[in-house]
Image: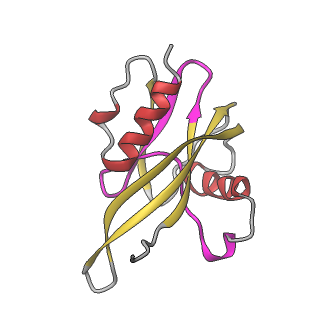
Amino acid sequence: MEKDTYFVAVKVFLEDGKGNLLILKDRFGDFDLPGGRLLPGDFSLPLEQVVVRKIQEELGPRVNYILGRPVVFMRHERDEVLQGGSKEMRRIFAVGYEAQYNGGEIVLGKNHEHYEWVSLRTFKPEQYFTGGWLRGVQDYVQLKSF
């Protein structure tokens, strides 16, 4: 039986203490959570250190937060444009951490163009997310059911 290949990522469910979750819109028009794939040099690092790097890259160095524990595991597929313009399917396995936002200016990195805080009480993930990210966000919202 043939083995599958996955990229590994960390994602952060960042809450503001008022029942709101931070979501991002990437430069391709898709909604996302803070975080991303591991780089080759991240192999021996604790995943929590990778989260620190990804948060700084995507939300800026002034964001203050307390990282919690992994709460959701996600598998997502998407087409990515390769050099030369061809597309290739990528599969991503992501560990989703909960985190508490404690202030600090959010300055989006180069891969995101917009962010918003959505209420976990009224948020409808299917209006924003697709695929494995949608299932992961739905799982998180269900965990946080009030």
In percent of width and height, residue 133 lies at 40, 46
Q: Is residue 28 visible?
A: yes
Residue 64 can be seen in this image = no
Q: Residue at x 25, y 81 (%)?
A: 85
Single out the residue that lies furthest toward the front.
1
Q: Return the x and y of residue 74 as percentages of the image width and height.
A: 47, 49
Q: Percent x, y for residue 76?
A: 39, 55
**Coordinates of residue 81 in the picture (x, y in percent):** 30, 74
Q: Residue at x 52, y 54 (%)?
A: 94
Residue farthest to the top, as pictured: 146
**Residue closer to the observer: 28 or 38:** 38
Task: From this view, report whether residue 70 is shown above or below residue 29.
Answer: above
Instruction: Give yes or no for residue 123 being in the magenta stretch.
Output: no
Total numbered badges shown on the rendered structure: 0
Vertical arrangement, residue 23 with respect to residue 51, above or below: above
Which residues fall within the magenta stretch?
14-42
In the image, what residue occupies the spot 70% across and 37% down?
68
- In magenta stretch: residue 29: yes
Q: The N terminus lies in which quarter of the figure?
A: bottom left
Q: Quadrant of residue 46?
A: bottom right
**140 left or right of 10?**
left
- Left or right placement of residue 104 versus residue 7 in this view: right
User: Residue pushed farthest bottom?
Assistant: 84
Question: Which residue appears at 58% of the width and 48% of the height?
Answer: 59
Give above or below for 34 relative to 84: above
| Left/right of residue 127 with respect to residue 38 in the rendered view | left
**Colour convention of the picture:** secondary structure
Q: Is residue 113 above or below residue 141?
A: below
